[in-house]
Image (cartoon, coloured by chain):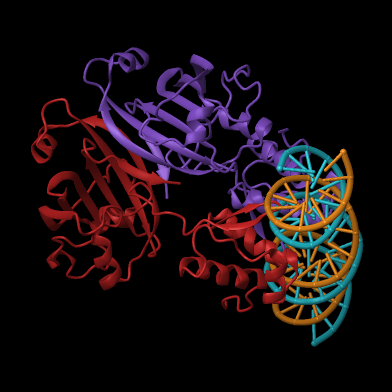
Chain colours: A red, B purple, C cyan, D orange
Amino acid sequence: MQQKLVIPQHRKVYEILRSHITDGVFKEGDLLPSENELCTVHKVARPTIRKALDRLANEGYIVRHQGKGSIVKGVPKGVGILSMTGTTSAIGEDNLKTHIIIKPEIRNWNEAFTFPLSQLELESGCIYMERLRLVNSKPVFYDITMIPNINLSRFTSRNFENKSLFDVLRKYYHVEVRGGEQKLLAIVADERLKDYFKVGSGHPVLQLNRKIETSRPGFYIYSQVFCNTDEYALYGSF
Amino acid sequence: MQQKLVIPQHRKVYEILRSHITDGVFKEGDLLPSENELCTVHKVARPTIRKALDRLANEGYIVRHQGKGSIVKGVPKGVGILSMTGTTSAIGEDNLKTHIIIKPEIRNWNEAFTFPLSQLELESGCIYMERLRLVNSKPVFYDITMIPNINLSRFTSRNFENKSLFDVLRKYYHVEVRGGEQKLLAIVADERLKDYFKVGSGHPVLQLNRKIETSRPGFYIYSQVFCNTDEYALYGSF
DNA sequence: AAAAATTACTTGTAAATACAAGTTGAATGA
DNA sequence: TCATTCAACTTGTATTTACAAGTAATTTTT
């Protein structure tokens, strides 16, 4: 089966306007050309233009005001760790340092935190690693990552110091992250976390259990992240 | 200024179909009546029906297939509280009971948790309420909600027991939630939380500070939610 | 000069019409 | 019987037309 090769007009207009916003041709606060102007420019009828604008408004690129016009709101703002895949993409590389606690090694697994595993995943074994992440030299994240050992040759011999795991997967294994699910809870630091985060007894810690979908069907990445939110609260937008 | 009293047809149709899905009249997997059938039933033209269906599809209630029809997908539940606006939409009405701790009342405010306030918001005062949410008869959420007192006539006299705040805002005030931002952290239960959640000293609690955007420009809802994640972890997909 | 009305825009809603394109099952043919 | 064709659906795209309603600046009136 072929790709749909005819791209509808309203989609073309959407793509054009969208790129004009992301590229800065239209900046935040700007008034978009009126619907009728856009009609003549793109040589389509108003409902077609409106369909494109509907989508832009829906995605947060613009806000429309009856009687005034459509005002550019800019690119929908950055998503924090709660809707992102890795720590690096949320915090940024500059302030983030990584200590490898346990280098990637092949293990058996029985379960991935609270997520059930498929037969194939169980049989393949997992690549296990533990990392401590420092934000501005302070330990904030401690994460355990488990990846099914499927088609990842020489993975355990790669170096992950100060590198994004997901960049490696994308670059060398063509595995792209698509989304995922996560469970959040608050716990009390155990001995290990007290040691890593250098905190006292009874210290609250935020825990995330995540199952991350990839572009490879049936290939999931499991990770468990512990956060010390004393100084850095987790941020997310939706 | 008056409320907008004329509700557009496409909106009415949307509300009807949506409630039919949430109430189980249409169940998951069901085939919705065809667009033309819906036209005759609701006595409107097809573009009007399509606009209602567009929104339902966009919000994940239905999936449309060219040549086949629109298939009901159910209440978009995949998204938990982390990407949703209220507790009700994440947990579902059935298992959720609400105790009003402080009924909506008008107050002054100096700050909204960690979020800065605009001049207008400060001058308008806020509607303040506190609620305890029970999931399967166990206290799990305790939330403080602050809403700017702008154009919300008779709001404080409404009843919010076991009702979704956001449904009320949508239905009676045409305020729709667009998105928002939130900060998450883990804390130790204070005396108040220990009392509400019936937990002992040193109990970890998950705290969310949220600023929620609405369809009204400049109108934000602020809420602070405390969760006892002992039995129910917060769930989210991205 | 200040208030009110007008006018010329803007977006919002709604209908009627037409055809394209995907799906399905029944009728038709070999 | 089996495969093909066809007809009758479905949703998708697009135009044209019309009017409602909000906004803002201009003009007129007071």
B129 vs A195: above or below: above
Residue occupying image coordinates x 73% and y 44%: B11
A23 with respect to B93 (left or right): left
A22 with respect to B183 (left or right): right
Picture quadrant of residue A195: top left
Locate residue A3, reporting x and y percent: 56, 76
Q: Nearer the viewer, residue A182 or A78?
A: A78
Residue occupying image coordinates x 21% and y 35%: A230
Locate residue A187, reporting x and y percent: 24, 30
Locate residue B21, reporting x and y percent: 66, 39
Q: Nearer the viewer, residue B211 or D5?
A: B211
**Quadrant containing the N terminus of chain A in the rendered view:** bottom right
Picture quadrant of residue A208: top left
Asked if one can make out residue A237 in the rendered structure from this viewpoint, the answer is yes
Picture quadrant of residue D29: top right
A148 vs A48: above or below: above
Q: How many marks?
A: 0
A79 with respect to D26 (left or right): left
A166 vs B7: above or below: below
Residue occupying image coordinates x 63% and y 47%: B29
Q: Nearer the viewer, residue B122 or C16?
A: B122
Locate residue D28, reporting x and y percent: 87, 51
Asked if one can make out residue B34 in the rendered structure from this viewpoint, the answer is no
Residue occupying image coordinates x 59% and y 30%: B150
D6 with respect to A43 (left or right): right
